[in-house]
């Protein structure tokens, strides 16, 4: 499936993508969170949100959180789809690291045409997730039942890595660390120790390493 939303300024695309990803990660979409994610000032976010309201891309819920309209959701899905397809191509075909692919895909997502998008899908045989396990919109992906956070596991429990949420991609050095440690979708590991502060020691391919509480609460796994 190829999304073809009307053309908008790249800034609108960036904001719709951010709102989509925050909601996907189960976070309340507040202007402060958008400012933190995009590393811009809160007044700048407020101004952009007003423009997006006038364009019919976002609306405010009764709780004060932001929601995408149908047009905003279509634009977000188009951008997210192209970003994740680009990441998959950059890692699987060009063999870039996770961090490099994420950075480059942030540029590609705004310039990939429907023709190139369809070609990427064909060449890669319709991938359903990005390299981090996040669903590619329109691919028909359905996650496993019983998926939960790594932090919910007890010592001795085995797990299969399912998804590294987008939120972790914005933590400096974290993608590189997880990729090097082998915490990648499909890998099997075991929790060997848990600290009171939420840090877990896990073992993947016979190699132990620690994962801090922030990442443990967000990495999605299933039973091995």
Image: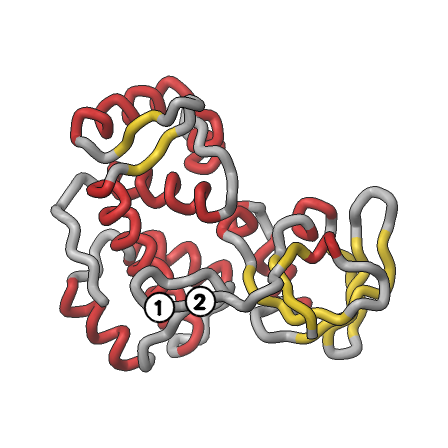
Image height of 187 relative to 61, above or below: below
* Quadrant in the rendering for residue 59: top left
Pick whichever, 33 or 66, lies toward us: 66
> Residue most toward the top?
43
Residue count near mark 2 (Cα–Cα under 10 Å), binned few <14, some 14–19, many ≥20: few
**Residue 46: x and y, percent?**
34, 20
Q: Is there CB contact under 8 Å for labels 1 and 2?
A: yes
How far apart are the two marked residues, 1 and 2, measured between alpha carbons?
A: 6 Å
Residue at image coords 64%, 60%: 177
Q: Under tag 1, what secondary structure?
A: loop
Pick whichever, 95 or 112, lies toward us: 112
**Residue 5: x and y, percent?**
16, 50
Q: Under tag 2, what secondary structure?
A: loop
Residue at image coords 14%, 69%: 115
**Residue 49: x and y, percent?**
30, 26
* Quadrant in the rendering for residue 224: bottom right
Q: Which residue is mark 1?
A: 140
Left or right of 221? Residue 29 is left
Residue at image coords 32%, 81%: 125
Image height of 16 relative to 49, above or below: below
Residue count near mark 1 (Cα–Cα under 10 Å), binned few <14, some 14–19, many ≥20: few
**Residue 37: x and y, percent?**
46, 37
Pick whichever, 207 or 24, lies toward us: 24
Instruction: Name the colouring of the figure.
Output: secondary structure
**Residue 175, numbered label:** none
Residue at image coords 37%, 58%: 104
Q: Which residue is mark 2?
A: 142
Q: How many marks?
A: 2
The quadrant in which the N terminus is found is bottom left
Image height of 4 relative to 34, above or below: below
């Amino acid at each position: 499936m190829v999304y073809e939303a009307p053309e908008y300024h790249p800034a609108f695309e960036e904001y719709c993508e951010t709102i989509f990803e925050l909601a996907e990660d189960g976070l309340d979409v507040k202007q402060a969170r958008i400012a933190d994610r995009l590393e811009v000032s809160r007044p700048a976010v407020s101004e952009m949100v007003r423009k997006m309201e006038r364009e019919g891309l976002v609306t405010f819920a009764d709780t004060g959180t932001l929601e995408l309209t149908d047009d905003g959701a279509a634009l977000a899905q188009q951008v997210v789809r192209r970003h994740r397809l680009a990441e998959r191509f950059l890692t699987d075909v060009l063999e870039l690291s996770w961090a490099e692919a994420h950075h480059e895909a942030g540029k590609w997502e705004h310039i990939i045409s429907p023709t190139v998008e369809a070609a990427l899908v064909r060449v890669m045989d319709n991938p359903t997730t990005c390299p981090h396990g996040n669903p590619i919109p329109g691919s028909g992906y359905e996650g496993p039942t019983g998926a939960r956070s790594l932090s919910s596991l007890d010592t001795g429990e085995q797990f299969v890595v399912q998804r590294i949420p987008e939120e972790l991609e914005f933590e400096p050095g974290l993608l590189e660390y997880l990729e090097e440690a082998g915490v990648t979708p499909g890998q099997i590991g075991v929790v060997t120790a848990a600290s009171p502060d939420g840090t877990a020691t896990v073992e993947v391919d016979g190699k132990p390493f620690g994962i801090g509480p922030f990442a443990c609460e967000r990495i999605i796994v299933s039973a091995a």
